[in-house]
Image (spheres, rainbow, N blue to C red):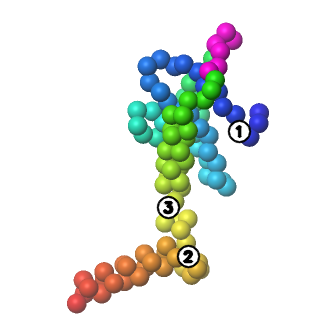
Amino acid sequence: MPLKIRCIRKSGTTESSIAFLKNGEYKNIYIHSQGRSYTIPFEKAVQLFEATKTEEGILPIPEIHYKHINHIVEQFERDITTPEMVGGKEDTDDIRANSAIKHLNNWLADLLW
């Protein structure tokens, strides 16, 4: 299969999009449905992707699909951005980690005085 592939089809009453996302070793399958994006297990994705031989795709790709994919990507980035990924003690160049440490130290100093 190509790296990027899209298949649009009618699915009933709700509009939803499914995407596989990968960033290094982090990968997952997400669905966007009813205004929110969340992960789904591989087995569920396979069931949703299953189509009959007579089913036809829809062209052109609706604009709502791109909005769904953008929301999925944002959720994926939130999910994989954990404190461990931001930086550790050895990583003194990480601005977010240094900023968080500074705010924590200020908060602790105010608390102790």
Q: Secondary structure at mark 1?
A: loop
Looking at the rendered structure, the kind of residue marked 1 is Lys
Circle nearer the N terminus (2, 1): 1
Please rate how many residues cluster around mark 1, counting C-alpha atoms within 10 Å: few if below 14, some from 14 to 19, many from 20.
few
Nearest to viewer (mark 2 / mark 1): 1
Residue 22 in sight from this viewpoint:
yes
Residue 72 in sight from this viewpoint:
no
Tell me whether circle 1 and circle 3 mark residues in contact (CB < 8 Å): no
Circle nearer the N terminus (3, 2): 3
Q: Secondary structure at mark 3?
A: loop
Magenta span of residues: 52-58
Q: Quadrant of residue 102?
A: bottom left
Q: Circle 2 is placed at which residue position?
A: 94
| Residue at point 52%, 76% (across, down) | 95
Q: Circle 3 is placed at which residue position?
A: 82
Q: Is residue 54 magenta?
A: yes
Q: Is residue 45 left or right of residue 75?
A: right
Looking at the rendered structure, the kind of residue marked 2 is Asp
Instruction: Give the main secondary structure, helix, strand or loop, of the magenta stretch.
Output: loop
| Residue at point 51%, 34% (across, down) | 64
Q: Circle 1 is placed at which residue position?
A: 4
Tell me whether circle 2 and circle 1 mark residues in contact (CB < 8 Å): no
Looking at the rendered structure, the kind of residue marked 3 is Thr
